[in-house]
Image: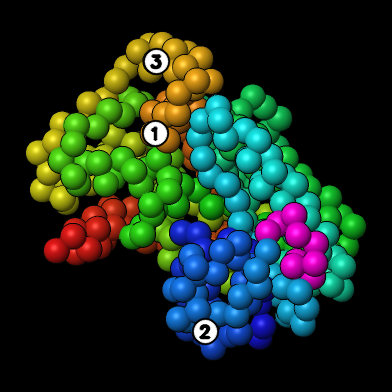
Amino acid sequence: MRYAMTGATGFLGGVLARQLRDSGHDVVALVRDPARATSLQDLGVELVVGDLDDTAALDRLLAGADGFFHVAGWYKHGRREAETLRRVNVEGTRNALEAAERAGDVRTVYTSTIALNSDTHGAVRDESYHHQGPWSSNYDRTKWEAHEIAKEYAARGLPVVIVQPSVIYGPGDTGSSLGQLTRQIIDGRPTLGPRGGGSSWSHVEDVARGHVLAMEKGRDGESYILAGEQAPYADVFGWVKEDAGARTPVILLPRPLIRAFAALTWQLERFVPFPQAMTAEAARAGMGTYYGSSAKAENELGWTHRPVREGIRETVEAELAQRR
């Protein structure tokens, strides 16, 4: 099979591209900068240079494709990210699905997220739940809008299957707030975290495999949550510290202090760039719960996920091995 991809230079997309190539499929990927895609070229991935707003490049990407994985997305927190979040997550998704439609209704798997439900306040949501706000971050909001766009195209007849991963973790995560905090703990630097928040946790290898299963077995127009075990952030940070043998303190701040911090940094972000993990949106999201049920994906796709404790240990070991 010949599969087209967006987002192949990202954390999840790179793993998915490798899995597809390991299975013997041809893969063609849309990339903005070929210099950042040498690992894809080493895998034998064909590159098409362009962006999500480049109609001609999207058409070249999808020419002759048997299937299309639209994985590209912008996952950043912070007031300064609002414009890019909308351009990539909302308009980029519309452009990608429009190209799949132009190419003859190419079967498509779209990467959504359980974050479109934002803070679930301890509830475990499944695919039947329809959140209508509020959202803890612009990322959550723009992914909700993009999800609605995917549903619109499905209603128009595009054979699109939607997958909704929970928090994705694993070796090689360099961009997310979680990845930054993990490296901070391993580096032995004092780390601040929220008290009370938590998420469902999905290893990147399992999420990539879930995309392949959705392409092969998913029902057109349906959504499938790819959510692993639930665990508080405090537990995950503690496991990272334990597995790394780190002595750094992990300080869990109470909610009133987090709220005050978020209110202050939200104003300051107009003038001063903050690290991802220190933005007001990251603080608000860290106080919430992002819980989802993967029962539908397990029953219909045969999807499975590894225990989060096992996955965190593997992630830390991989990070430590890179430093030796």
Q: Tell me the quarter of the image containing the N terminus.
A: bottom right
Which residue is labeled 3 in the image? Answer: 261
Distance Cα–Cα, label 1 vs label 2:
35 Å
Q: Over which residues does the magenta segment extend?
A: 51-59
Q: Residue furthest bottom?
A: 24
Examine the rendered structure and indicate whether residue 187 appears above or below residue 107.
above
Residue 213, image x and y in percent? 59, 71
Q: Residue at x 62, y 71 (%)?
A: 29
Q: Earlier in the sequence, mark 3 or mark 1?
A: 3
Crowd band around label 2 with a 10 angstrom C-alpha radius: few (<14), some (14–19), many (20+): some
Q: Are marks 1 and 2 in contact (CB under 8 Å)?
A: no
Residue 102, image x and y in percent? 87, 67
Q: Which mark is residue 275?
A: 1
Q: Is residue 69 visible?
A: no
Q: Is residue 55 magenta?
A: yes
Q: Is residue 152 visible?
A: yes
Q: Earlier in the sequence, mark 3 or mark 2?
A: 2
Mark nearer the viewer, 3 or 2:
2
Write down the quadrant of residue 191 in the picture: top left
Q: Is residue 244 left or right of residue 169?
A: left
